[in-house]
Amino acid sequence: MSLFCALVTVIKRIDKIKRNFLWRSIDGKKKMVKIRWNVICNPKVKGGAGVVNLGVKNKALLAKWSWRFAVEKEVLWRKVILAKYGSNVQCWRFKTTCPKNMYSIWKGIVVNSMDAAVSRCVGEDSFYWKIGNGKTALFWWDKWCGDRPLKWIYPRLFRIAKSKDCTIAEMVSLLGSGNTNWNEYFTRPLLEREVGLSKELAERVIGIDLNLSREDRLCWVKDKEWVFSVKKCTELLMLEDGEINNFDFGILWNIKVPPRVHSFLWILVIDRLPTKEFLVKRGVCFQKFSLNCPWCEGVPECTSHLFFQCKFIDGFWGRIFKWWAEVWKPVEGFSDFFVLCNNVCMNAFRKRLWLIAIAVACWTIWLARNGMIFDKKRVYMENLVFL
């Protein structure tokens, strides 16, 4: 997958094996699908389980060749590609055209680099040059001074420049004596409105401090380490493909609880707990059990009622909040509940303990509910609080 563009049929077949592993029970029978596969493949910060989409992973692995082409200057395969297909104006970028005789493996890499999502990760705007001796980065074309190349900042000067492909070192040497007469560097004399731009550009050039003992360094702006990584690229591509969810899942996954409780909280937030209302919607028939809430027995059981709206549970949360010297306010659903819990005024250490207590309390409610339904246990307030 790091060299070849995977076929769609192959990816679908592998995804099917993964889905079957997730949804089938030990005896081989298919389980109830509670969560859509594309939701499971979403990043954790966007409400998914973080299961990597193989198609996205394949794109990230192929995208790494753009980075390797830029930084591995002396390797044989790069020299072969340059000799056969040439490079872009920026010698660190390969051409994105695909002639008919292009080798199939390299064609797959080039086509992948032209994908809209991939180009936002490894396109021209994703790289930045830290200047050393100035002999590699191009003065006009590369991004090294500000958030855009100088050709976009000074388009009028770029159009009339004699040498559009000069390096930073070459431009510094031209102005090394402090000469700011730009007429000899352009194809025609500067107009009055261009003189001010040329002076501004000259100040940028004169202010460059080259380090002759160090080469220019290409940096990937998408990562704090400035180095391309397949893991980070995969995360970025998954964020683009993922569904929009305004809930802050990052805080949820950072709560220090066992993985089983993490999974429970995630299913609770996305409203996929197998409550009675949920199971009825999926076609499950109840003959031995009542469809009502096990606590109050007066309202059909759904997630919001079971955890927040039931009068019995309302008293439970009142006690929990009182122990922590916080004020409990009735809420409609988990999103409102999470905002209430997250907006408390506590120091960082106390807040971490507070969120752990809230997570354990939700888990306790679910365990007590299951005990009442399946084991016929009667749970009272004191038992629930100290469970």
Image: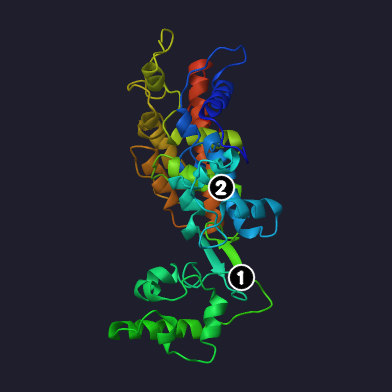
**In this orientation, does residue 257 appear?**
no
Q: Where does residue 60 sit, x and y in percent of width and height?
A: 56, 44
Pointer 2 residue: 63
Image position of 155 with respect to 314: above or below: below
Label 1 SS: loop
Q: Quadrant of residue 11?
A: top right
Tell me: residue 202, above or below residue 50.
Answer: below
Circle number at residue 216: 1
Residue sitting nearer the eye, 95 or 298: 95
Label 2, residues with CA under 10 Å away: few <14, some 14-19, many ≥20: many
Is residue 38 rendered to the left or right of residue 262?
A: left
Instruction: Residue at 66% x, 79% y: name it.
Output: 212
Q: Quadrant of residue 350?
A: bottom right
Q: Residue at x 36, y 71 (%)?
A: 155
Q: 186 and 152: which one is in front?
A: 186
Q: Residue at x 66, y 55 (%)?
A: 79
Residue 354: x percent and y percent?
A: 52, 48
**Quadrant location of the N terminus?**
top right
* Mark 1 neighbour density, 10 Å: few (under 14) some (14–19) many (20 or more): some
Which quarter of the image is occupied by the C terminus? Answer: top right
Does residue 351 appear anywhere in the picture?
yes
Q: Left or right: 347 with respect to 258?
A: left
Going by the numbered disc 1, the residue's amino acid type is Asp
Q: Earlier in the sequence, mark 1 or mark 2?
A: 2
In the rendering, at what x and y percent does residue 209 appear?
57, 82
Using the numbered discs, state the Cα–Cα distance from disc 1 to disc 2 in whole angstroms.
22 Å
Q: State the residue at coordinates (44%, 8%).
A: 288
Q: Is residue 318 left or right of residue 122?
A: left
Q: Secondary structure at mark 2?
A: helix
Q: Amino acid at mark 2?
A: Ala
